[in-house]
Amino acid sequence: MVFPKLPRSFTRKLHKTENKRERTIQGNFLIPVPPGSSLPDDFPRRVSLGEILVDAQTKRILSPVNGLASLTADRTHFQIKQDGAWRTDSPLQITSYTYETFLEICKVGALASLDFEHLTLDQYFSSFKKDGTFDIFLAPYARYNYLPFSNFILDEMPEAFKEFESLIRKIFPNAKIHNEIKPDFIPFKHPDGIPEFFISQKTGSTIRDAITALDSRTVMYLGPETIYHILRMAFYNEPFTRRHLYVCLVDRKGRMDTESRFYLLTNGQSLDFVIKNFDSRYKIASFQSMYEGVNSLDIRSLGNFDIYNHSILLLYERLPVIRNSFACIDCYECNTYCPTNANPIAVVKNNSEEFVKSQCIQCGICTLYCPSGIDIRSKIQGLV
């Protein structure tokens, strides 16, 4: 399988090694050190692609390339100077796994849940009993579904996905698998990609019951981006050192360009290519979605790609307008569009006791539709 190539962010050179032509990238990678990590004293040192730089409690950081790794003076970032060959393809390798070897491959590949924050996949899978009775949902939507990962899986990795489903059945023999990643799955609409909402819709339960099922491990939830990276590691030997970044353009009037632009980027690589590859009229950037508060950045200060925190990049022609909050006009748009009937207008009216906190999934839809510009989501976050 050939994965999308990197954008032209580095100088590329071709050289001959043992009569074979290999592609070499020369560049610097800057990767943040997880807070509270215990770092060894053997830096600087030579590292190989996939070698562990630090094993923190909630995430593992691997070297994304072959090269020389060191720590910045303040010991907050790994700095890696690449000087090795770069692979451009990874052949499919159907491998048989046991429960133990599958957990080990998740650990070696630094696979993380991209559905739940601060959770490695070996920790997640091992929190379920091997012979336990529970439901496993293979969901077709990522949280905000910027990219069609279900289509990536079905179109590009069908054999690996079929093997993965068989593997899950083998290592959790008493679990009931609900495979929702099918060619005819229903088109996405927000908040279908939020795990507790998806589970509540599929099981007919309340949001509170769905959260309880997820927390008590009577339901396992695997979104398509998480599955995509499991397949890459388990059957293509590609550790979690790259992730897709979706780029969306917003014009001066706030209209979004719906053209699909995405890049499979390497952890720690410079995002300077954004300045070179996009029109100069886009000067402001944000790593937040339209449903979240915007922390705007100058496009010249994007820094480096972080696979744990960067999945979308919005580019604006001008600084997003600060929402001016006016008095509520009792239009009830927030309640009308609330997908879980949490009664968000109660928060606006300062009647928090009437707000159904257990039903709220903080999807941001109420804020998006409020004509008075009230940041209802932030008010809710102050309560929960």
Image (cartoon, rainbow, N blue to C red):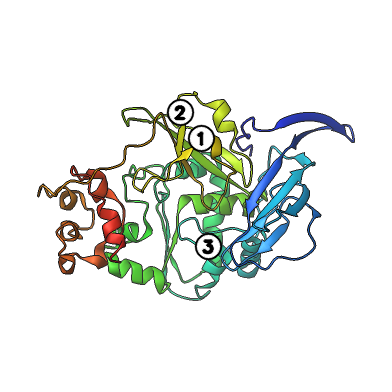
Of badges 1 and 3, nearer the viewer stands 1
In whole angstroms, how far apart are the C-alphas of marks 2 and 3?
A: 45 Å
Q: Amino acid at mark 2?
A: Tyr
The number of numbered discs placed on residues in the rendered structure image is 3
Q: Amino acid at mark 1?
A: Ile
Q: Earlier in the sequence, mark 1 or mark 2?
A: 2
Mark 2 falls on what kind of element? loop
Tell me the residue at 69%/53% (across/down).
Answer: 78
Of badges 2 and 3, nearer the viewer stands 2
Q: Position of residue 295 (x, y in %)?
A: 42, 46
Are discs 2 and 3 less than 8 Å apart at CB?
no
Q: Which residue is mark 3?
A: 168
Are discs 1 and 3 less than 8 Å apart at CB?
no
Picture disc at residue 36: none
Q: Nearer the viewer, residue 206 or 257?
A: 257
Are discs 1 and 2 less than 8 Å apart at CB?
yes
Whether 103 is drawn above or below 188: the answer is below
Mark 3 falls on what kind of element? helix
Tell me the residue at 71%/55% (across/down).
Answer: 73
Q: Position of residue 269 (x, y in %)?
A: 64, 42
Q: Which residue is mark 2?
A: 282
Quarter occupied by the C terminus: bottom left
Q: Earlier in the sequence, mark 2 or mark 3?
A: 3
Quarter of the figure with residue 353: bottom left
Tell me the residue at 19%/64% (across/down).
Answer: 355
Q: Residues within 10 Å of mark 2 (few under 14, many from 20)?
A: many
Q: Position of residue 56 (x, y in %)?
A: 62, 66
Tell me the residue at 75%/44% (across/down).
Answer: 81
Q: Is residue 31 left or right of residue 87?
A: left
